[in-house]
Amino acid sequence: MFARLKSDIKAVFDRDPAARSVLEVIFCYPGLHALWFHRVAHWLWKHEFYFLGRFTSHIGRFMTGIEIHPGATIGKGFFIDHGMGVVIGETAEIGDNVTLYHGVTLGGVSWEKVKRHPTLMDNVVIGSGAKILGPFTVGKDSKVGSNSVVVKEVPANSTVVGIPGRIVMATEKPQDRPDLEHGKMPDPEAKAISCLFDQIRELERKYNALAAEHEALKKKIG
């Protein structure tokens, strides 16, 4: 148990440069508190103490502003930065070394009592305000940009942005550790506009060349 607690604290130091001391992390990090509440709630849920599990989860939500259903499955090295407004649904599954920022929702899109929440594989980073909706998988080492709305499968080693979420970058190279630079996302709209400007400039160049040839021919004929 103490090894797991030590691992939780280490995850904070690994991914938050603002963390200065173990005491500060233990007492002042709501994402860590929410995870610890969830551990108790999940144990109760798995042993069919459903009311106690939900009540423990409710207390954790009241104390931290983070709602994690006791039925959700969470791996090692999980880190929620800031955390206010994070919602994790009942059938969500989270792998190892996953990072969520504030306002993230791992939600469902069905009323059926089936797997209806997403699965996040190892080393996934979800930017602030992003919504992952549905029973699909976000592949290992992937990133989802802030305020994106993802409603379909994300392959491993991909970067997703936009509403609805679109894959704007994919690589086969695995990461040694989570890439937390979720603010440095590709801008597909800017890239498309840049390509249009390049095409316009090329058309202008060709037009000017044709116009010059036309004037030269006019002078030659005249």
Image (tube, rainbow, N blue to C red):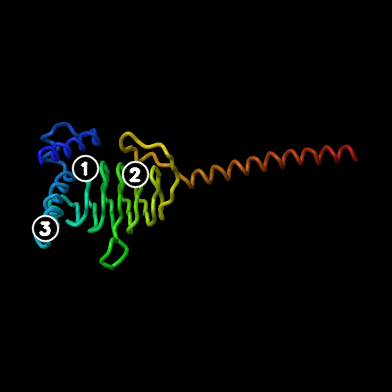
Q: Label for residue 140?
A: 2
Q: CA distance from mark 3 to mark 2?
A: 30 Å
Amino acid type of the residue that numbered disc 3 sits on in the rendered structure: His
Is 210 situated left or right of 134 in this image?
A: right
Q: Nearer the viewer, mark 3 or mark 2?
A: 3
Residue situated in front as seen by the camera: 51 or 48: 48
Q: CA distance from mark 1 to mark 2?
A: 14 Å
Q: Please give the residue where the numbered disc 3 appears in the rendered image.
A: 47
Q: Quadrant of the C terminus?
A: top right
In the displayed structure, 147 sits above or below 180; it is below
Q: Label for residue 76?
A: 1
Q: Residue furthest bottom?
A: 112
Q: x and y percent of residue 151 in the render?
A: 37, 57
Mark 3 vs mark 2: which is more N-terminal? 3
Q: CA distance from mark 1 to mark 3?
A: 21 Å
Residue situated in front as seen by the camera: 79 or 217: 79
Q: x and y percent of residue 210 in the render?
A: 76, 41
Q: x and y percent of residue 143 in the render?
A: 36, 44
- Classify residue 17 by image quadrant: top left
Amino acid type of the residue that numbered disc 1 sits on in the rendered structure: Lys
Q: Residue furthest right?
A: 222
Q: Residue at x 16, y 48 (%)?
A: 34
Q: Residue at x 17, y 56 (%)?
A: 70
Mark 1 vs mark 2: which is more N-terminal? 1
How crowded pointer 2 is (Cα within 10 Å; few <14, some 14-19, many 20+) is rated as: many
Tell me, yes or no, whether the two marked residues, 3 and 2, touch with CB atoms within 8 Å.
no
Q: Residue at x 23, y 45 (%)?
A: 80
Q: Quadrant of the N terminus?
A: top left
Element assignment for label 1: loop
Q: Label for residue 144?
A: none
Mark 1 vs mark 3: which is more N-terminal? 3
